[in-house]
Amino acid sequence: MSGKARKLFDALDLNHDGELTRVEVISALRSKGPTLAARGDLPLWAVGDADAASALFDAADANGDAVLSYEEFEAVVDRRFGW
C-alpha cells in the first residue's frame, strides 16, 4: 500500500466523495498534473492527454461500474507507477 497512491487519489477526487469518475480523472490531471509531477506525487511521464487519462481509468475500473474506488485506483497506480 502506498501513501503516494492515497495522496494522488485525494488530489484527483475533485468533489471529495471518495470515488473517481472518468471526468474527474481527466479534469484533475489536466489542471493539477504538472503541479503533482513537480511535487513528486505523480511521475512526469504520467501527465498525459485525455486519452492517456482515460486509459488509466479503464485499467483501474476492475468491476466496470464507471467509478473508481480507492482500492481499484491503488492497485493500478502502485503497479504502473512503481510505488
Image (cartoon, rainbow, N blue to C red):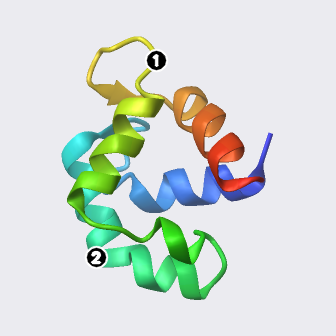
Q: Is residue 74 above or below residue 52?
A: above
Q: Residue at x 44, y 32 (%)?
A: 59
| Left or right, 61 with reference to 39 | left
Q: Which residue is mark 2?
A: 31
Instruction: Name the spot of residue 26 as percent of width and height, x first.
Output: 25, 56
Q: Is residue 19 above or below residue 64?
A: below
- Secondary element under disc 1, as helix, strand or loop, is loop
Instruction: Name the spot of residue 22 as percent of width and height, x first.
Output: 24, 42
Instruction: Name the spot of residue 73 as percent of width and height, x first.
Output: 53, 37
Q: Residue at x 50, y 55 (%)?
A: 10
Q: Residues within 10 Å of mark 2 (few under 14, many from 20)?
A: few
Instruction: State which quadrant residue 49 falls in.
Output: bottom left
Which mark is on residue 43?
A: none
The amino acid at mark 1 is Ala
Closest to the camera, between mark 1 and mark 2, is: 1
Q: Residue at x 77, y 53 (%)?
A: 83
Q: Which residue is mark 1?
A: 62
